[in-house]
Image (cartoon, rainbow, N blue to C red):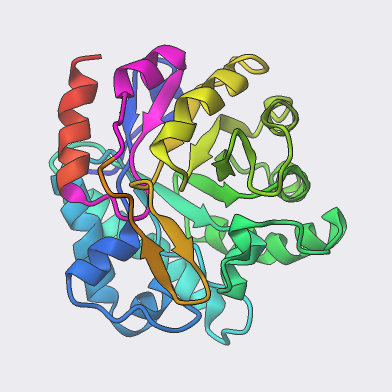
Amino acid sequence: MPRASGPLAEALARRAVLLDGGLSNQLAAQGCDLSGALWTGRVLDERPDQVHAAHTAYARAGAEVLITASYQVGRGHPRATALLHRSVALAARAAETADHEVWVAASVGPYGAVLADGSEYRGRYGLSVRELAAFHRPRVEALLAAGPDVLAVETVPDPDEAEALLTVLADTGARAWLSYTVADGRTRSGAPLSEAFALVARAPEIIAVGVNCCDPAEVLPALEAAAAVTRKPLVAYPNDGSVWDAATGTWHTPAAPAPWPTAAWHRAGARLIGGCCRIGPDHIAQLAADLLRH
């Protein structure tokens, strides 16, 4: 079956759409080595067949949007542009062999992601909005040149970086969703959610706004904060509630799985729903069944 024939924004106006899950955990489950600063980008570089296999696993689980392995590709890698293009091509190949329509979303990670030090969970890098825009522009342009259906501007820790990314999107005319990473009812940098979501609400390039890579318990309050300032479709793809320890390169896992009240998320306006880190194909298959009931 060919890739989705219409814009993702049009589908979101009609119904909920299922995102995929965490790429890193699926690659690890396939036996891949994710050590080093490139993280999933290392597998993209050395074992592209494994990236394709991971995308395929999510498509078979029912995912309607595949997010590319470009999240951490960028700074300091001489083949960055080629890898960005490859990331889109691999997701597109998996989409084209799915038994249902699938959109390809090119991941645009935050500045902190390419530092590989966990700073996307802190923000406040000491860079100006102009400097952040200059960093993101060539990556966004390279991804757009590869022909994705939409951009996934994800794991954004603060409104300053969101402003920089919105500037780049406005200049390129690209369509994207933008999702913040949040904790304790604020962005990871400590900004109020009302401020963060209001900034994005004014951007015509943004087709959906919400949160990702956060504790599932943070999702509903964040969606409600977003719905108070925008009528855009909302997006939610949390992790399993684990906390990343950048110093040791390990996840601290909760004692019990956190509940996922997806019906409540849907009522709050979520139309793009899926999983982030440590959420695998089995969970996405369950979400597919849940969404059919909404």
Where is 86 relative to 260, above or below?
below
Looking at the image, the residue that sits furthest to the front is 255
> What residue is drawn where x is 14% and y is 46%?
282
Determine whether, in the image, residue 30 is placed left or right of residue 84. Answer: left
Residue stretch rendered in magenta on the structure: 258-281
- Measured along the vertical axis of the image, is residue 207 above or below residue 154? above
Q: Position of residue 127 (x, y in %)?
A: 83, 63
Residue in front for this viewpoint, 144 or 63: 63
Residue 202 drawn at (x, y percent): 74, 25
Is residue 184 shown left or right of residue 132? left
Residue 139 x/y as whole percent? 62, 64
Screen quadrant of the N terminus? top left
The residue depicted at 52 percent of the width and 84 percent of the height is: 79
- Residue at 36% across, 75% down: 44
Q: Quadrant of residue 231?
A: top right
Work out whether 239 lies above or below 49. above
Decide: is 221 above or below 136: above
User: Quick check: is 259 in the magenta stretch?
Assistant: yes
Give the residue at x 54% y 48%. Answer: 154
- Please identify the quadrant where the C terminus is shown: top left
Image label count: 0
Closest to the observer, 85 or 218:
218
